[in-house]
Amino acid sequence: MEEEEEEEKSRLYEAYNELHGLAQDFETPFDAPAVLVVGHQTDGKSALVEALMGFQFNHVGGGTKTRRPITLHMKYDPDCEVPLCRIVSSDTDVEPPSTVTSVPQQKSLQQIQSYIEAENKRLEHEPCQFSAKEIIITVEYKYCPNLTIIDTPGLLAPAPGRKNRALQGQARLVESLVRAKMQHKEFIILCLEDCSDWSNATTRRVVMQIDPELSRTVIVSTKLDTKIPQFACSSDVEVFLRPPACTLDGCILGDSPFFTSVPSGRVGSTHESVYRSNDEFKQQAISLREMEDVASLEEKLGRPLSKEERSRIGVSSLRLFLEELLKKRYMDSVPLIIPLLEKEHRTTTRKLNDINQELSNLDEVKLKEKGRVFHDSFLTKLSLLLKGTVVAPPDKFGETLQDERVNGGAFTGTDGLQFPYKLIPNAGMRLYGGAQYHRAMAEFRFVVGATKCPPITREEIVNACGVEDIHDGTNYSRTACVIAVAKARDTFEPFLHQLGFRLLHILKRLLPISVYLLQKDGEYLSAHEVFLRRVASAFNNFAESTERACREKCMEDLVSTTRYVTWSIHNKNQAGLRQFLGSFAGSENSVTSTTSAVSQESFGSVTNEKNNVKPRADVKLSHLTSGVDSGTCIQTTETKLVDLLDTTLWNRRLAPSSERIVYALVQHIFHGIREHFLAFAELKFNCFLLMPVVDKLPALLREDLEYAFENELDNVFDITHLRHSLGQQKREMEIELKRINKLKEKFRQIHEQLSSVRSG
């Protein structure tokens, strides 16, 4: 009966070891129960794993040693006097996934230790100094427990400060790796704490982020032999051995922590070695260390330890607890593993059938037809996105206006300010396709429509006056035109480039969304990467060239609008301008008349003084206009024209009235250019960027594909490489299918045996 029970346990452990290897090699979605060792650097993780196994093999010591997780499938074999080790999977990250081997390679302890040390040193000099790829080793030994243990890299706790940034980056990387391993619900977490005060949650801080209640966590206090001398009185030891439930924040496995000590000497034949054999290390050193720890604790407590307390002291107690716990998990999980294997068998079979179908379709006629079908499906998805759809999830593919500004550029004027995004309709919504294009155009209208003419300085007006080619008078209408077109060109040209870049960003986003829709509908050619890259490149090139051509057309309009002022185009508000100039002319006439009267009166005063004639106080302006008809008190049209020419054409001193006229004309012309710019920019981007995607892209894309089909079909589909790749995938799938079938049969037999035992 005992032999049958041992044989049954052996088959159970062997089945789970194969299951774990299958999950690792082929990244299948199930995990076998295992013990995951988690702790900070120098907490003694690797040394504890060696003590649990009963022999030394690992790369241990100060600093960071373990840089790849090491999975150990341990199997108890009473007849195995020397550890029998095999490397199930030892490929490095540098090698391609196809080099994963499922054939165990027997290695000596020295070879395994050398390999692990070489891997750690290699990774130490890599940019990414840690790897999540496991080293899987199976071990059979007379002192081995029946356990699967995964030793992880030690967590780091670097000091703050800029000078420690490199170490801080490594700490984040290691913690991310360990957290990812702890996410597997089937794993029992062995949480190592190197502290004498349970309120200091060093490793538990990380573990409880994944397992808040510690419901699948076993806590182990390491280096017990160094902590016992630190306690001053027995009460401290009592609290340490039996910490209050509130201190550990949960219901931990085993109801209480375990306490271990591991001898520090190494096994070997050199003068530095302390132990000559693994038997000496296991039977003498570890056992002696446990007895010394018990004796030291009883001396500190002043009483003998109870049976329950003794069951928590030493590596042997921890090993027995873990072995029984894992055995129970194994047996409880057997009924759950079989349906997962069935599902994986169906999935792998379907993938293998798909690969066989792909191999049978590798001829020119079928490949061309598949390419044409993909072409039509791709264009259908593009059209659907522009017209509007809700098939693609907005949380994955949509962009808010803030996201769009960051990724596609913002509309920014000469002042560098952005229009408040909250004022744009649908700014907070995550849009894509035609809806996003429409929102971008709406924002363009808002921003450009609210753009005002930049400030005009007196220096700019004077510099714009210049000198005519036939006289040195001033032409303020020309001055206003010069200033207005310069201001408009500098203001609106950046908006044109910003609009093109933004709309091009929106159009290019259609490609990944279309790919998602094709994948969702099963119309994506996943095995033809070269062909897909060609289609993507053709689409992006078309979008870029079309946007560039459209922007050049808009630039021609902007140049013509700012090159020559055509009043029928620029004079959009003639009535308003006439009213302003009319009121201005009235006030200007009164100022001119008053100025003329004062000047004549001053002239008369000077003349009288020369002739010693005192001026009369009641002299009127009309009395000073000798030589003019006394009945006429209103200036003639000719006089008004002379006064206007005197203040504008013949006078280069910039009077406030002239400045106001120039400013009014500049504003008038600028606003006319702005309205024209808005109209032609929106119209041309709709006609020459958006519409070509609908009516020109299909023909151009089809033409490009047909040319490729006729002249470089092998390069487009890369038939040779594709056939080799599919053949490799087929072989891997066949291997995986055989392993799944074998495992499925093993677990079915185990399940039947367990069911018969329980029913009996």
Image (tube, rainbow, N blue to C red):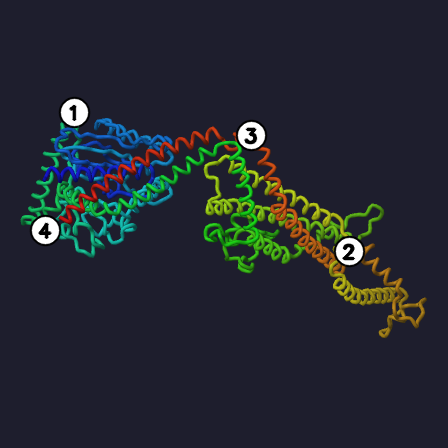
Which numbered tag is attached to residue 568? 2
Q: CA distance from mark 4 to mark 2?
A: 103 Å
Q: CA distance from mark 3 to mark 4?
A: 85 Å
Ranked by sequence position, the earlier of labels 4 and 1 is 4
Q: Position of residue 726 (x, y in %)?
A: 42, 33
Residue 286 found in image quarter: top left
Badge 1 is on which residue?
A: 269
Which numbered tag is attached to residue 712? 3
Ranked by sequence position, the earlier of labels 2 and 1 is 1
Q: Position of residue 655 (x, y in %)?
A: 76, 58
Asked whether 106 or 181 is in front, the reply is 106
- Secondary structure of the residue carrying numbered label 1: loop
Q: CA distance from mark 4 to mark 1?
A: 42 Å
Q: Which residue is most to the left? A: 303
Q: Residue at x 42, y 31 (%)?
A: 725
Q: CA distance from mark 1 to mark 3?
A: 66 Å
Q: Badges 4 and 2: C-beta atoms under 8 Å apart?
A: no
Q: Nearer the viewer, mark 3 or mark 2?
A: 3
Can you say whether 82 is above or below 748 in the image? above
Classify 10 Å Cα crowding around label 1: few (below 14), some (14-19), many (20 and above): few
